């Protein structure tokens, strides 16, 4: 079982990604930011190796405007050697990485311009992982998108537009239940049509539940059947509700007792668990220590 965190490391120097406004995205500025961000990524990977963390989500901001015509730099060639060096460290340490395109990457939109921009963004994310020299078990996580007043039609558009994606993107793509529109059951129904792995998000399922009466262990088992051997171990997202915040808000720090109870209820299945929490790596380290105690 690998436990990890997303994008940022609390208290680790020289690991924060930088961005700029589009109006400031000159070639020198883009080169400066790309150098800075690759250095930050390598520092994050080095920290993970030192700490024994083998699961990590790379920020979509790694290459500024990476999927936009604003950035005309052939960054995949310019920084090829550096990307390969970072990728070698990832592979040598048995680390698994992922990326999670944001809320504006929506392939089920009724607006084809939005769909095409979303495909461009997925191509960018896949290219990052390709340049790192990583196999298809290093995934891209995507939500289904909007409902647009007709959920079934929106699901059908997702299925149709999935077929427009290049094979290199399809091989990496996994889909996730969300906290508002698409339940775990909805996402599994899409998976059944296009044979794509499903990442189960515990908090999203809590606030936007699927079939009444199914517990986490049962949903995890249902999602497990969508994963093939070439996809790597099944992944899930684990988080806890922030007290006093809107449903679906991540807590500041994981309550370890609650996490251990969750692990016990799913009977220590062979999973990769991404901890989604505000204190990032700090909670990941706490949860890793708790698992080590369970296994000792």
Image: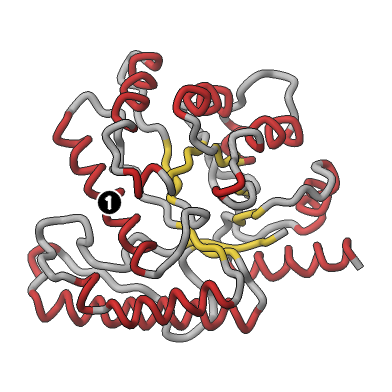
The foreground one among 292 and 249 is 292
Percent of width and height locating residue 154: 34, 20
Which residue is painted at 60% across and 76% down in the image? 93
Regarding residue 243, the answer to whether it shows in the image is no
The foreground one among 254 and 195 is 195
Would residue 131 be found to the left or right of residue 51 on screen?
left
Please determine whether, in this image, residue 107 is positioned above or below residue 270.
Answer: above
Q: Which residue is mark 1?
A: 123
Which residue is painted at 28% across and 77% down in the image? 80
Percent of width and height locating residue 185: 57, 23
Please determine whether, in this image, residue 238 is positioned above or below residue 106.
Answer: below
Q: What is the tally of numbered marks visible in this picture?
A: 1
Percent of width and height locating residue 61: 31, 64
The foreground one among 271 and 151 is 271
Quadrant where the image shows the C terminus: bottom right
Which residue is painted at 36% across and 83% down in the image? 39
Regarding residue 135, the answer to whether it shows in the image is yes
Q: Quadrant of residue 47?
A: bottom right
Would residue 248 be found to the left or right of residue 181 on screen?
right
Which residue is painted at 59% across and 42% down in the image? 228
The foreground one among 83 and 15 is 83
Quadrant where the image shows the N terminus: bottom right
Please determine whether, in this image, residue 189 is positioned above or below residue 277.
Answer: above
Q: Secondary structure at mark 1?
A: helix
Q: How is the image coloured?
A: secondary structure
Percent of width and height locating residue 103: 34, 43
Residue farthest to the right, as pictured: 296
Residue count near mark 1 (Cα–Cα under 10 Å), binned few <14, some 14–19, many ≥20: some
Would residue 113 be found to the left or right of residue 253 on screen?
left
């Amino acid at each position: 079982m690998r436990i990890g965190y997303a994008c940022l490391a609390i208290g680790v120097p020289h690991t924060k990604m930088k961005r700029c406004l589009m109006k400031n995205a000159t070639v020198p500025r883009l080169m400066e930011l790309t150098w800075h961000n690759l250095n930050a990524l390598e520092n994050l990977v080095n920290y993970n190796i030192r700490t024994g963390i083998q699961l990590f989500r790379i920020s979509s901001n790694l290459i500024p405007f990476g999927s936009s015509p604003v950035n005309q730099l052939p960054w995949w060639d310019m920084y090829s050697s550096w990307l390969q060096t970072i990728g070698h460290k990832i592979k040598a340490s048995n680390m698994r990485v992922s990326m999670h395109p944001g809320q504006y990457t929506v392939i089920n939109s009724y607006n084809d311009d939005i769909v095409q921009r979303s495909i461009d963004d997925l191509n960018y994310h896949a290219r990052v992982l390709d340049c790192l020299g990583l196999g298809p078990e290093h995934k891209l996580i995507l939500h289904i998108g909007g409902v647009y007043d007709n959920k079934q039609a929106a699901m059908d558009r997702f299925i149709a537009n999935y077929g427009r994606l290049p094979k290199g993107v399809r091989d990496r793509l996994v889909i996730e239940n969300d906290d508002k529109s698409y339940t775990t059951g909805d996402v599994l129904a899409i998976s059944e049509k296009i044979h794509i792995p499903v990442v189960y998000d515990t908090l999203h399922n809590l606030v936007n539940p699927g079939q009444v009466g199914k517990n986490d262990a049962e949903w995890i088992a249902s999602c497990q059947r969508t994963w093939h051997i070439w996809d790597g171990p099944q992944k899930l997202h684990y988080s806890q509700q922030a007290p006093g915040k809107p449903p679906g808000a991540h807590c500041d720090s994981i309550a370890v007792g609650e996490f251990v109870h969750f692990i016990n209820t799913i009977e220590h299945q062979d999973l990769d668990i991404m901890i989604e929490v505000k204190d990032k790596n700090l909670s990941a380290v706490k949860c890793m220590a708790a698992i080590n105690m369970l296994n000792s």
